[in-house]
Amino acid sequence: MSDTEFPEPPEEFLKYQAGNLIALMTDGDAVASVLDDLTRAGFPRDKMYVLAGPAGAERLDVTGQHHGLRGRVYRTFSQVGDEHEELVRAGNHLQAGGLVVRVPADKDEKAVAARILGEHGAVHVVYLGKATYETLDP
């Protein structure tokens, strides 16, 4: 993994929000490169973030236990559906030392972002739209 500093997620409780791609990656140097290429392609770097390794899994907080009652309730209600499955997948990937990249994109931009992520070794990419969920694996 690279020693590169990655953009950190916002301080608040992390939720999968509509209008974002979530990519699982394994190489820190590739993540640094993909962030540069996504920025050059017009994606807002200040809205992207990266979670890395077990510390990232703790920050993601799949169970909500680190974010009090509100976090636990939110995660409990989100256990139905694809969001929970993707949350668990990302948490497991992080626990195993992987990286998770979040890229904001609308439905017209998602294919471009997924292609760029795939070119840099993303192993799994999903797009979360409004009431939609789509796997865009490279």
Image (cartoon, helix red, strand yellow):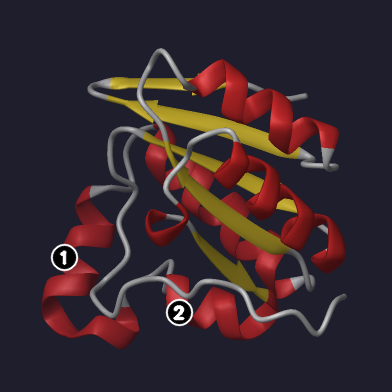
Task: Identify residue type, mark 1.
Answer: Val
Q: Closer to the camera, 116 or 87?
A: 116
- Circle 1 crowding by C-alpha within 10 Å: few under 14, some 14–19, many from 20: some
Q: Closer to the camera, 36 or 20?
A: 36
Residue 8 position within the rendered picture, expressed as x and y whole percent measured from the top left: 47, 75
SS state under label 2:
helix
Specify the quadrant that holds the N terminus: bottom right
The residue that appears at 62% across and 44% down in the rendered structure is 23
Ranked by sequence position, the earlier of labels 1 and 2 is 2
Q: Residue furthest top?
A: 108
In the rendered view, tell whether residue 24 sits above or below residue 2: above
Left or right of 56, for residue 109: left
In the rendered view, tell whether residue 90 sits above or below residue 21: below
The residue that appears at 80% across and 85% down in the rendered structure is 3
Quarter of the view holding residue 69? bottom left
Quarter of the view holding residue 65? bottom left
Q: Which residue is mark 1?
A: 73
Residue 40 position within the rendered picture, expressed as x and y whole percent measured from the top left: 61, 41
* Labels 1, 2: front one: 2
Q: Which residue is mark 2?
A: 59
Left or right of 104, for residue 4: right
* Contact? badges 1 and 2 (CB < 8 Å): no
In the rendered view, tell whether residue 69 sits above or below residue 20: below
